[in-house]
């Protein structure tokens, strides 16, 4: 996810979108509409932007808008929205989401260290052997 993509998505969201409503409620209470600067202030520096985006739409019970073009975000949204179905059809997604839990802090540290050393996700998967290779495609979302 690059800043230009986040900027495009957030500026494209309709004023009543669940994500903007959440942003308004948490940071700009009392504001009817958000300026461009207000819309971009938090998403551009939010390391958990994808999670916050998915959570807002899941809690609102609405689908992600078309402006959300990241396959990993859509895949994680689907895994969280339909957990019983996707546990069978996409176990790697659930494996990656489980890796993001606080109880997996030690594993996260090891993976972050290996990734910071310059190894690719595939090389980390080969070295650790703890997780399926397809799980690592979702790691940027959970780490």
Image (cartoon, grey):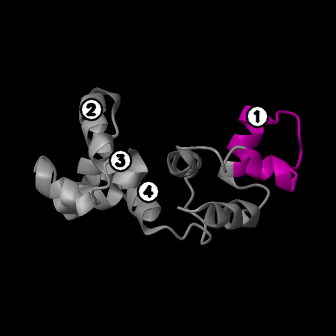
Q: Nearer the viewer, mark 1 or mark 2?
A: 2
Q: What whole-number distance in Å separates the C-alpha atoms at marks 1 and 2?
A: 30 Å
Looking at the rendering, the stretch of residues picked out in magenta corresponds to 20-41
Distance Cα–Cα, label 1 vs label 4 = 24 Å
Q: Nearer the viewer, mark 2 or mark 4?
A: 2
Q: Between marks 3 and 1, how big is the CA–CA gap?
A: 32 Å
Identified at 77% across, 41% down, the residue is 24
Between disc 3 and disc 2, whose residue precedes? 2
Give the mark nearer the N terminus: 1 vs 2.
Answer: 1
Residue at the location (63% across, 60% down)?
3
Does the CB distance between marks 2 and 4 fall below 8 Å? no
Assign a secondary structure to mark 2. Answer: helix
Distance between mark 4 and mark 3 Cα atoms: 27 Å
Residue placed most toward the observer, 88 or 20: 20
Decide which of tag 1 and tag 4 comes sooner along the chain: 1
Q: Give the residue pinned by disc 4.
A: 77
Alpha carbon distance from label 3 to label 2: 18 Å
Mark 3 highlights which residue?
116
Q: Is residue 12 above or below residue 30?
A: below
Q: Quadrant of the C terminus?
A: top left
Q: Secondary structure at mark 3?
A: helix
Are circles 1 and 2 on residues that touch, CB within 8 Å?
Answer: no
User: Given this view, does label 3 or label 2 mark the residue nearer the observer?
Assistant: 3
Alpha-carbon span between mark 2 and mark 4: 21 Å
Residue 66 rendering spot, x and y as whole percentages: 60, 72
- Relative to 111, say whether 103 is above or below: above
- Along the viewing direction, whichever of 116 and 109 lies nearer the viewer: 116
99 lies left or right of 34: left
Q: Label 3 near label 4: C-beta < 8 Å?
A: no
Question: Is residue 85 visible in this depiction of the protein?
Answer: no
Disc with the residue nearer the chain's start (2 vs 4): 4
């Amino acid at each position: 996810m690059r800043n230009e993509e986040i900027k495009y998505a957030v500026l494209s969201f309709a004023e009543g979108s669940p994500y903007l409503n959440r942003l308004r409620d948490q940071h700009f209470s009392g504001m009817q509409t958000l300026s461009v600067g207000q819309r971009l202030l938090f998403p551009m520096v939010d390391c958990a932007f994808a999670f916050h985006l998915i959570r807002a739409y899941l809690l609102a019970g609405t689908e992600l808008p078309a402006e959300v073009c990241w396959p990993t975000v859509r895949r994680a949204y689907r895994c969280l929205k339909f957990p019983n179905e996707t546990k069978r059809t996409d176990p790697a997604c659930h494996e990656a989401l489980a890796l993001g839990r606080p109880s997996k802090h030690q594993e996260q540290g090891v993976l972050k260290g290996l990734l910071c050393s310059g190894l690719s996700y595939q090389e980390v998967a080969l070295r650790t052997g703890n997780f399926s290779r397809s799980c690592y495609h979702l790691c940027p979302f959970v780490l």
